[in-house]
Amino acid sequence: MKIFWETKLAVSATRADMKKLFPLTSPKHAPARVVASIKADVRKYLKRERRKELPEGVDFWDFDCRAGKDAETAAEVHVAEITKPIDGAATENWEAIYLEILAKPGHRTAKPQQED
């Protein structure tokens, strides 16, 4: 029988990055449903990663994101705009979209003060 705290330590010690090729077509589902499903998977992954315990000296989890037709042609995308390439791929009738989301430690920086 496993003890809960051992399982929790094992899970938090490993980081799983999302590198996935999502098909945009499905014989069983409408294209809009497929796009909505991909967006839900991405949001669920981001939410799960943000809930993980922060290391010492880290303020938040930041993400390096890339999106494109495949891994070689994927371009960098800000995490707040990760759903825009999914919509663009759907309107351009791509067969699939490659998404890569890598979690990294983030540190807050002070905003520069404005002088009046």
Image (cartoon, rainbow, N blue to C red):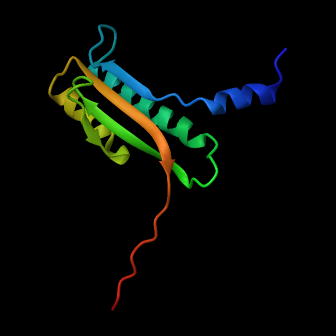
Outermost residue on the front side: it is 56
Q: Position of residue 104 (x, y in %)?
A: 48, 43
Q: Residue at x 57, y 53 (%)?
A: 58
Left or right: 7, with 42 as reference point: right
Label total for image: 0
- Residue 86 appears in the figure: no
Q: Is residue 51 above or below residue 33?
A: below
Horizontal side of residue 92 vs 16, given as left or right: left
Outermost residue toward the top?
27
Q: Quadrant of residue 25?
A: top left
User: Quarter of the image containing the N terminus?
Assistant: top right
52 shown above or below 60: above
- The percent coordinates of residue 37 (x first, y second) are 39, 25
Residue visible at 40% across and 34% down?
101
Q: Residue 94: give x, y in percent of width and height.
A: 18, 21
Vertical side of 116 occupied by 28: above or below: above
Residue in the image at 36% along x and 30% along y: 100
Q: Residue furthest left?
A: 92
Tell me the residue at 33%/29% (across/down).
99
Percent across and percent down for residue 2 are 82, 18
Task: Looking at the picture, tell me which residue is in the foreground, 111 or 13.
Answer: 13
In the visual, does 102 lie left or right of 76? right
Please tell me which residue lies in front, 56 or 28: 56
**Quarter location, residue 95:** top left
Please state, as top left, top right, bottom left or bottom right, where the C terminus lies in the image: bottom left
